[in-house]
């Protein structure tokens, strides 16, 4: 049921593109440039859209201001697929010491609890000074208190302090972690180059071209136009191969989804069905391939959307 829903949504989207191509009087197989939807037309079309725009502007502004610039310094040289950047490395060190205090206390090992405390307190106080806008998240008073309660062997009070400190960790994580990941962990797709036989393309242009050829296969197959369907197929297969190569802009391990050998086997089966004149089979395979586009979008677009808003 869900699968059918997904395919339908994709079809509606892509058929729109296909009609745009048809109405511009060029065959889908020859033309790779797809006209974009006219945002101004959409804007003037609906009621209450002004409110939507106002809310969007507010959200964009929030996203742009949501992370202090002072954090950049602690992420210089950070790369996707790697836990890099001084900020996150220090977080792991601080968490190690913090967990150490808890475990030692549970075991009644006060000597090691104090040793871990000393390490933790230095890190916590040091980190609290790094980003002025984030100073308010830290509770250094509770950390001082924990030192005193540990020295006094007061275990119940120590656990209470630990709870108060732990709340400061959770609060900041809840507010900021997703934005930090989007900003520093994900590379911007707009900086990715896709090398094609039509020259170098931006990611967005390669996607538009891919969508045009994808729709071309379905539309031409439905019309029973075998040679046009075959042209669209060849362009689609070439572009999808180029997009697959472009995954390596961010990933240095083989990709098991969306562009893997089984997906290309389906693509080739679709081509064979066009060659054999089995258009209904070709159309069914074309629709099943749309699910791969959809799933890759569901995975990668949320972070990219956040980046688009944060980086204007
Ligand atoms: C990496 C996985 C991935 C795969 C596979 C993929 N896309 Fe995309 N696509 C993206 C991302 C990410 C964006 C958003 C780029 C941005 O906002 O800068 C996008 C954007 C688009 C867009 C909007 C382009 C624009 O004008 O900004 C279209 C249309 C599109 N994809 C179609 C497709 C179709 C059709 C397929 C399959 C045949 C496909 N995509 C496969 C990741 C993927
Ligand atoms: C602009 C950078 C970028 C591009 C280009 C990109 N990805 Fe990703 N992708 C990421 C990031 C960041 C993650 C988060 C998880 C990680 O680091 O592996 C991710 C995660 C994934 C994952 C889930 C984690 C895993 O490794 O299994 C898959 C699958 C994936 N990408 C497939 C693809 C495919 C297929 C393409 C090309 C069609 C692609 N990606 C292109 C940035 C990118
Ligand atoms: C002022 C904000 C802030 C405070 C306070 C804070 N953290 Fe973090 N922490 C972050 C951010 C932002 C990240 C995400 C960093 C990344 O993934 O690059 C993070 C990541 C982490 C991670 C890495 C794991 C993950 O899921 O990303 C650990 C572990 C961690 N913090 C532990 C702690 C502990 C323990 C405390 C409290 C004693 C604490 N943090 C307090 C901001 C904070």
Image (tube, rainbow, N blue to C red):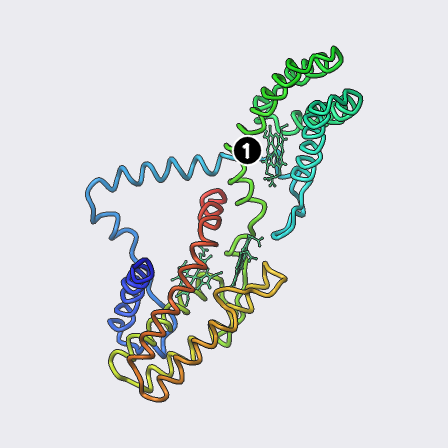
Image quarter for residue 207? bottom left
Q: What is the residue that sits farthest to the top in this orientation?
A: 152
What's the residue at 20%, 49% (across, down)?
Answer: 45
Question: Does label 1 point to a residue whose CB lies under 8 Å from ligand 3?
Answer: yes
Residue ID for mark 1: 173
Image quarter for residue 143? top right
Where is residue 40 shown, x and y percent of the image?
A: 28, 51
Q: Secondary structure at mark 1?
A: helix
What's the residue at 58%, 45% (across, down)?
Answer: 184
Where is residue 36 shown, x and y percent of the image?
A: 33, 61
Query: Which of 236 and 61 lies nearest the eye of the viewer?
Result: 236
Q: Please, is residue 60 above or below residue 136 in the view?
A: below
Q: Please, is residue 93 above or below residue 135 in the view?
A: below
Image quarter for residue 297? bottom left
Where is residue 252 shown, x and y percent of the image?
A: 63, 62
Q: Quadrant of the N terminus?
A: bottom left
Count of labels in the image: 1
The 10 Å Cα crowd at callout 1, few under 14, some 14 to 19, many 20 or more, is few
Query: Which of 167 and 103 lies nearest the eye of the viewer?
Result: 103
């Amino acid at each position: 049921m869900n699968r059918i829903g997904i395919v339908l949504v994709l079809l509606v989207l892509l058929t729109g593109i296909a009609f745009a191509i048809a109405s511009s009087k060029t065959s889908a197989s020859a033309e790779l440039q797809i006209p974009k939807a006219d945002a101004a037309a959409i804007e003037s079309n609906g009621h209450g859209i002004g409110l939507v725009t106002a809310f969007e502007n507010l959200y964009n502004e929030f996203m742009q201001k949501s992370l202090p610039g002072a954090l950049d310094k602690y992420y210089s040289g950070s790369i996707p697929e790697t836990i890099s950047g001084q900020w996150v490395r220090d977080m792991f060190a601080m968490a190690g010491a913090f967990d150490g205090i808890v475990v030692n206390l549970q075991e009644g090992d006060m000597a090691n609890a104090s040793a871990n405390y000393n390490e933790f307190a230095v890190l916590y106080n040091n980190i609290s000074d790094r980003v002025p806008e984030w100073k308010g998240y830290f509770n250094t008073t509770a950390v001082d208190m924990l030192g005193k309660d540990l020295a006094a062997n007061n275990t119940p009070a120590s656990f209470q302090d630990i709870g108060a400190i732990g709340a400061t960790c959770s609060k900041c994580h809840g507010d900021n972690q997703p934005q930090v990941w989007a900003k520093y962990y994900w590379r911007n797709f707009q900086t990715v180059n896709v090398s094609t036989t039509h020259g170098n393309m931006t990611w967005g242009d390669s996607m538009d071209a891919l969508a045009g050829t994808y729709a071309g296969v379905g539309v031409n197959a439905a019309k029973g136009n075998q040679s046009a369907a075959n042209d669209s197929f060849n362009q689609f297969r070439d572009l999808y191969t180029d997009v697959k190569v472009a995954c390596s802009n961010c990933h240095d391990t083989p990709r098991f989804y969306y562009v893997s050998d089984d997906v290309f086997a389906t693509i080739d089966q679709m081509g064979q069905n066009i060659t054999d004149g089995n258009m209904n089979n070709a159309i069914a395979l074309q629709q099943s391939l749309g699910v791969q586009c959809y799933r890759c979008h569901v995975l990668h677009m949320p972070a990219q959307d956040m980046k688009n808003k944060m980086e204007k």
